[in-house]
Amino acid sequence: MNLIEARRNRKWIGCIDFGTAMSKAAVVRRKPRTELISADVVPLAIGDRDGMAVRSGLLLPSVVYVSDQGTILFGKEAEDAAIRGERRNRQAFVSPKEYLSTRDPGALDEGLEREIDPTGDFTARKLLALFLAHLLVQAGRAAAIANVPWPVPLRIARPAWDEERAAAGEQALRSLVLQAFAIADRLGGQLSAIGGITHDAARSALAAVMSDRRFLDPAALPDVFELSASGSASVLEATAVAAGAIGDTRRRVVVVADIGGGTSDFGAFMTGLPGRGVLGEVDGSSGILRLAGDRLDVLLKFYIFKQARIDPFDSGSKGVVAHIRANQRAFKEALFTTGQLTIELVDNFLTVRKEDFLASPDIQEFAKLLRSAFHDTLERAVACARENALQGRRTPVEALLTGGGRSLPMVTDFITDPPLPIRLDEALPEIPEGPLDQNFLDLRPQLAVAIGGAVMDLPHQTARVRIRDVADATAQKVHKIANAVTTVRDAVDAAPAVHDVARTANPPPAANESEPARVPSSGRWRRFRGR
């Protein structure tokens, strides 16, 4: 079957959550969100591979590896190959969504570092298209096993980019998906095979597809996508979470914090009266912090280097440095799960305790910046709740934590120690109703974006919630300060000023100058008004 031109089954909607660390996909039956039952919601096991053990088939590592043996590998297989290649100074192409979030669109067509692509033949755009082609083939296989239709009209989840990047990012995402479908038509099952695809097969498919001008037009083949009234095929990640998790049970305002691998997305949403089926997005509440779980991986790596007195640039430390870099995510998971981590070095062992790591300056700075971003969205949620009191009774404000980083201590503090003096209850996912298997329930917070993004009726934009004119003015100053931040340490140096202007209309004091952070950040927190 020719996927790019195949007739879409419009009784279902699909969503691709093209994650920084893990990618997910789901299909949901086209019916009102309040009527959904468990049988209408199907997360696709795009990570499952024949003959390969994976931790969860519902999660696909967002990794591509250009091997020295003439093949290109994807997902878990690429992760494993990258670990083996660290000792040869090889690297995988990881966090592909970050290329769309932080790089200039033109950079997608520039060559990659030789550590990532020793052939010099593949650009970021080409590897992105190949990865998405692998994901789409995997989705088709998973849909067949789950006995649901494929292909279906698709939405693509994205962070809350600013207006300029959103327009360019929308076009890039749609073009990449169209190119990926065309590549999948050419390579088919090769994209799912153990051992990957050959360099020659990849070059041939890319040469044919990338030269087809149809795929560069975002309006080309519109039936491939589930388009909004404004013609968009994308959905904000926090909006998707709200659509698939907030039930029609009572009037309340829910703050969504989706803490992923590369970005943390925030938004606030208000429900209508019970039975009305209304879910509105609070104007101006969407925000993105380009720091999340992956940044903790990097900070832990450098913390280990410091504690063990390892010079990562010393040739004599090459082996142990490669070992730490290759396992930094697993080390973080073990540290936060068990409370301590013991690492074998060259001739001794190093034990890292969670409380010591959390008390380190870099982690304190990271936590402050995360809290500042949550504070801003929460502030608008509280204002919305106050202005929409029902019969003189306070409208409750709740927080819904999702994503792979939802259980991090600085994130759970949002509930136990909110940044504003209010009672903040934790919201639990309510849609769909009915029995669900334990594997799904365990991973539901990570699947929330893919599932919600496929729900038929997404939250609409509410009428503008006016906090006060001074709040609007100070929000612009917050935005200006945040955009001037270029490193983790610089951002935290600016955080007190951000808080100050959020409280008063007085100009903030200049952020103190400081030495560059040990671990530079390519991310900046941004506050956006509207969508």
Image (cartoon, rainbow, N blue to C red):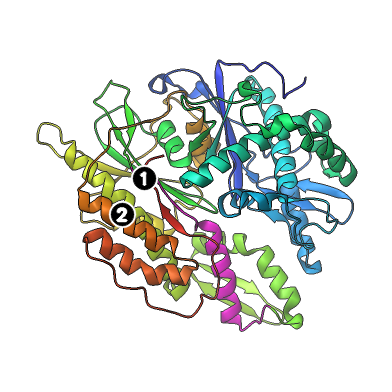
- Viewport quadrant of the C terminus: top left
Q: Residue at x 45, y 65 (%)?
A: 485
Q: Residue at x 32, y 63 (%)?
A: 498
Provide the residue span drawn in magenta.
284-312
Q: Residue at x 69, y 63 (%)?
A: 326
The part of the image, by quadrant, that contains residue 87 is bottom right
The part of the image, by quadrant, that contains residue 44 is top right
- Viewport quadrant of the N terminus: top right
Q: Amino acid at mark 2?
A: Ala
- Answer with mark 1 or mark 2, whichever residue precedes in sequence: 2
Q: Nearer the viewer, residue 433 or 209?
A: 209
Asked if marks 1 and 2 touch (Cβ < 8 Å), the reply is yes
Density class for disc 1 (Cα within 10 Å; few <14, some 14-19, many ≥20) is some
Identify whether 185 is placed above or below 312.
above
Which residue is the site of mark 1?
A: 529
Disc 1 versus disc 2: distance between alpha carbons? 9 Å
Q: Residue at x 67, y 31 (%)?
A: 139
Q: Nearer the viewer, residue 339 or 81?
A: 81
Residue 475 got which mark?
Answer: 2
Identify whether 457 is placed above or below 478.
above
Whole-percent x, y for residue 51 in the image: 79, 40
Apparent side of residue 80 relative to residue 414 in the rendered image (left or right) = right
Question: Quick one: SS at disc 1?
Answer: loop
Q: Amino acid at mark 1?
A: Arg
Apparent side of residue 116 relative to residue 39 in the rendered image (left or right) = right
- Is residue 288 located in the magenta-colored stretch of the structure? yes
- Is residue 299 located in the magenta-colored stretch of the structure? yes
Number of numbered tags placed on the structure image: 2
